[in-house]
């Protein structure tokens, strides 16, 4: 397998990327359509950038993120949870990992680790934050191995069926 990690024009490849997210998360067409509009809007924000992982020319994983802005929807939802735990300062000077997905057929090969460490290595901010479904999972184990720790748990997003955890890590991320 010829794996290449590099910059991704996510706006041009949004449908390929969301197909990966749909398989990984079990999303239906209506959810994908909503997420498509969100991704396209996010990619217009200052500092937003994306990386892709291709195997033999096919997109098999992607990550995107941006400098956090307290006025963005995600920040307004998580801020009260972070404030309750005295971690709301993490919303300032942070690079937020908005999405990170690897096709299930390509997981457990270090692709997600390489995507997240590469994108955060290019961040000017001193720390990174993200949200993940609040359950023990390979994704949360990966984040912990990189130095992320729980800042808030049982975070409820409107229309999300499961609670999330907000995690944060100083940059650069830990290496094995």
Image (cartoon, grey):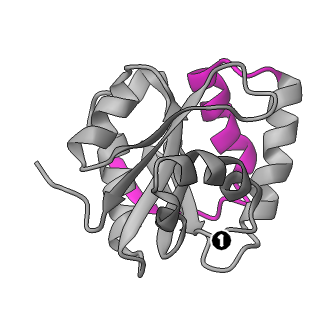
Asked if residue 124 shows in the view, the reply is yes
Whether residue 1 is situated above or below residue 62 in the rendered picture: above
User: Residue sitting at 56 percent across and 54 percent down?
Assistant: 83
Question: x%, y% of residue 80?
Answer: 64, 50
Is residue 72 found inside the magenta-colored segment of the image? no
Secondary structure under tag 1 reads: loop
Decide: is 160 above or below 72: above
The answer to whether 142 is drawn above or below residue 2 in the figure is above
The reply, left or right, for residue 148 in relation to residue 20 is left
Give the residue displayed 45% in from the left and 47% down from the top. 54
Q: In this rendering, is residue 122 above or below 135?
A: below
Q: Residues within 10 Å of mark 1 (few under 14, many from 20)?
A: some
Q: Residue at x 29, y 27 (%)?
A: 108
Residue 136's image quarter? top left
Residue behind mark 1: 69
Q: Is residue 44 left or right of residue 162?
A: right
In front: 160, or 151? 151
Q: Which of 168 and 176 lies nearest the eye of the viewer? A: 168
Quarter of the picture containing the N terminus is top left
Which residue reaches farthest left?
A: 176
Counting every numbered tag in the picture gives: 1
**What range is drawn magenta here?**
1-28
Q: Position of residue 66 (x, y in %)?
A: 58, 68
Q: Position of residue 142 (x, y in %)?
A: 30, 36
Left or right, residue 92 beside residue 21? left
Residue 1 visible in this rendered orientation of the protein: no
Report x, y in % for residue 89. 49, 67
Residue depicted at 56% across the width and 57% down the height = 64
């Amino acid at each position: 397998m010829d794996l290449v990690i590099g910059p991704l024009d996510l706006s041009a490849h949004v449908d390929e990327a969301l197909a990966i997210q749909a398989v990984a998360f079990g999303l239906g067409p209506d959810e994908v359509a909503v997420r498509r509009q969100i991704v396209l809007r996010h990619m217009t924000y200052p500092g937003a950038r994306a990386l892709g992982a291709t195997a033999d020319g096919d997109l098999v994983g992607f990550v995107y993120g941006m400098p956090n802005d307290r006025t963005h929807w995600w920040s307004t939802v998580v801020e009260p949870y972070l404030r309750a735990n005295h971690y709301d300062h993490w919303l300032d000077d942070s690079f937020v990992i908005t999405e990170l997905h690897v096709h299930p057929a390509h997981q457990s090969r270090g692709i997600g680790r390489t995507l997240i460490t590469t994108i955060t290595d290019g961040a000017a901010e001193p720390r990174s934050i993200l949200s993940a479904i609040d359950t023990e999972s390979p994704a949360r184990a990966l984040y912990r191995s990189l130095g992320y720790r729980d800042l808030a748990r049982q975070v409820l997003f409107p229309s999300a069926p499961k609670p999330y955890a907000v995690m944060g890590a100083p940059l650069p991320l830990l290496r094995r």
